[in-house]
């Protein structure tokens, strides 16, 4: 299954936000988390890879927590 334009935009947002030390991290993680039911497996795999292998680190300690929470949700490990 191909990745949609919407999914490409979300992937781009994740890649932009990883390593930032601003409110964009929380905003991006929250928005992507809400979209998970609408995402293809391919899209989720790309995001999982990008979060597991950040080029610039995760940012601050609280940013890393946001990324790890989103990673759990993308993997389906979240019980909420």
Image (spheres, helix red, strand yellow):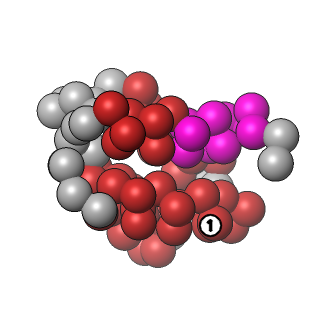
x 65%, y 58%: residue = 36
x 43%, y 73%: residue = 5
| Left or right: residue 2 compared with residue 78 | left
Picture quarter with the N terminus = bottom right
**Residue 40: image x %, image y %?**
64, 56
Q: Is residue 26 magenta?
A: no
| Left or right: residue 65 compared with residue 23 | right
x 52%, y 62%: residue = 30
x 51%, y 67%: residue = 31
> Can the viewer see residue 41?
yes
As drawn, the residue found furthest toward the right would be 79
Q: Main secondary structure of the magenta part?
A: helix
Given residues 60 and 46, the one toward you in this image is 60
Q: Is residue 18 above or below residue 24?
A: above
As drawn, the residue found furthest toward the top would be 53
What is the magenta range?
69-78
As drawn, the residue found furthest toward the bottom would be 6
**Residue 6: image x %, image y %?**
47, 74
**Residue 11: image x %, image y %?**
38, 56
Q: Is residue 72 magenta?
A: yes
> Where is residue 72, by image quadrant?
top right
Label 1: which residue?
35
Q: Is residue 26 above or below residue 73?
A: below
> Where is residue 67, by image quadrant?
top left
Given residues 78 and 14, the one toward you in this image is 78
**Residue 54: image x %, image y %?**
28, 31
Q: Is residue 32 above or below residue 67?
A: below
């Amino acid at each position: 299954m191909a990745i949609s334009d919407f999914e490409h935009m979300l992937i781009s947002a994740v890649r932009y936000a990883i390593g930032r030390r601003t409110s964009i991290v929380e905003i991006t993680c929250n928005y992507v988390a809400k979209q998970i039911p609408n995402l293809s497996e391919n899209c989720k795999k790309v995001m999982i890879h990008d979060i597991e292998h950040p080029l610039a680190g995760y940012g601050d300690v609280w940013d890393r927590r946001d990324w790890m929470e989103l990673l759990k949700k993308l993997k389906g490990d979240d019980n909420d």
